[in-house]
Image: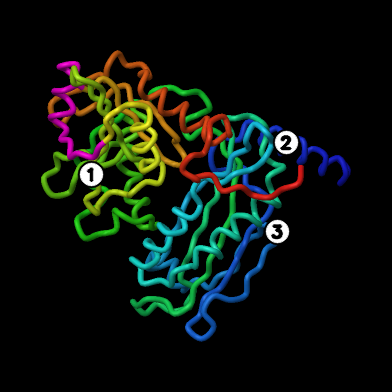
């Protein structure tokens, strides 16, 4: 095969992958990089091709986990324009995460301008399929070459992206979950309320347990009493409750050990506008099971940047009292109403009354 034929084959395979991107593997073509030092602050901004990094094997971020990141999405609206969902809010959460790890805060304008540059350069890779988006991954890590157990003095900020399909596939199917009785995601006073790399690797073994039990995800409980529902995997949870006088949409309250999701915050507002009573409340596993049995909790869904809104159909809890089904095991009407409202907002089918959509100038 000639070099020209090889290049053509690679391009054909890439085009096919972009049309069926999955989640996390089809990277776009560019990245943004910037350095921080005590003497110069934020400096040396660079925008160019996505490429491998060269790092010293003794880099502090690699050994001691001084790494924070974010996740946000860009969508193509029906008129062909590109928007990013709440980038300023993600920039502020990124600052909270880096501050928790004794790292410098990246100014919001640098964060948003980097997002604009990348989307303007790579938006052509996004198809018109409304189920697809561009997922942006900002990350900051410590770069000092030292194995002394201390905060780094120097840091690097990167922004990259990938073309994304649905986190659980492009269809809106319900997922089953396993209550984690062996492991905890976060502890009071820890890092559960921020988005840092060290939160995620310890969760993989529980995810493997869930998958071995025939479930797609794991539900985390609080670390103290081991009874209060906190999150599903890396996503926030919502419960739909029918009270006889109306419908409530309830999510576990923020205690410092679960992530204050940007999508979670948006859905609380969207639910209120849709006529539901939206609020925060601590919900125990026992209450979840009992209220499902009594027909009070009729729907449960998870939400997040990657998952958008994902229905939960059934719960496995073999070590804590047995399994149960949520509602009739199918995506419920409230869940689908809220999902549609959010997706329609992303794609410009309803007015952006809250100013959550950040337009990115592009030429197409």
Q: CA distance from mark 2 to mark 1?
A: 43 Å
Instruction: Using the image, determine if residue 74 lies above or below residue 198.
Output: above
Labelled disc at residue 15: 2
Q: Is residue 251 magenta?
A: no
Q: Could you say where residue 165 lies in the image, as x and y percent from the top left?
A: 56, 34
Q: Is residue 59 left or right of residue 315?
A: right
Q: Residue furthest top?
A: 328
Residue behind mark 3: 49
In the rendered image, the vertical position of residue 185 relative to residue 75, given as above or below: below
Q: Position of residue 275 (x, y in %)?
A: 33, 26
Q: Position of residue 182 (x, y in %)?
A: 20, 42
Q: CA distance from mark 2 to mark 3?
A: 18 Å
> Considering only order in the chain, which callout, 1 or 2, is on the residue closer to the N terminus?
2
Q: Is residue 144 left or right of residue 324?
A: right
Q: Nearer the viewer, mark 1 or mark 3?
A: 1
Boundaries of the magenta span: 279-296
**What SS does tag 3 mark?**
strand
- Quarter of the image with the C terminus is top right
**Cα gap from disc 1 to disc 3, whole angstroms:** 42 Å
């Amino acid at each position: 095969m000639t070099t020209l034929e090889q290049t053509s084959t690679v391009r054909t395979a890439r085009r096919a992958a972009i049309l069926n991107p999955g989640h996390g593997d089809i990277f776009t073509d560019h990245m943004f990089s910037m350095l921080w030092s005590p003497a110069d602050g934020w400096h040396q901004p660079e925008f160019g091709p996505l490429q491998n990094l060269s790092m010293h094997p003794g880099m502090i971020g690699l050994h001691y986990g001084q790494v924070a990141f974010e996740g946000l999405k860009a969508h193509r609206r029906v008129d062909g324009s590109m928007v990013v969902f709440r980038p300023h809010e993600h920039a502020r959460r990124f600052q909270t995460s880096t501050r928790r790890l004794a790292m410098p805060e990246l100014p919001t304008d640098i964060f948003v301008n980097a997002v604009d540059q990348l989307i303007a350069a790579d938006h052509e890779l996004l198809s018109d399929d409304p189920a697809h988006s561009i997922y942006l991954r900002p990350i900051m890590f410590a770069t000092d070459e030292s194995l002394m157990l201390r905060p780094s003095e120097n840091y690097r900020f990167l922004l990259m992206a990938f073309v994304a399909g649905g986190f659980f596939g492009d269809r809106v199917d319900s997922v089953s979950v396993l209550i984690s009785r062996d492991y905890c995601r976060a502890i009071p006073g820890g890092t559960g309320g921020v988005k840092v790399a060290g939160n995620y690797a310890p969760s993989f073994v529980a995810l493997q347990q869930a998958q071995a039990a025939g479930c797609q995800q794991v539900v985390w409980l609080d670390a103290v009493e081991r009874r209060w529902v906190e999150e599903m995997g890396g996503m926030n949870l919502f419960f739909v409750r029918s009270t006889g006088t109306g419908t409530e949409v309830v999510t576990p309250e923020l205690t410092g050990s679960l992530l204050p999701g940007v999508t979670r915050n948006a859905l609380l507002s969207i639910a209120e506008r849709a006529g539901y009573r939206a609020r925060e409340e601590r919900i125990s596993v026992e209450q979840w099971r009992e209220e499902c049995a009594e027909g009070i909790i009729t729907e449960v869904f998870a939400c997040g940047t990657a998952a958008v809104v994902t229905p939960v159909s059934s719960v496995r809890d073999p070590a804590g009292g047995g399994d149960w089904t949520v509602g009739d095991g199918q995506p419920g009407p409230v869940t689908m109403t809220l999902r549609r409202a959010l997706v329609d907002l992303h794609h410009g089918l309803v007015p952006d009354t809250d100013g959550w959509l950040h337009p990115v100038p592009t030429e197409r």
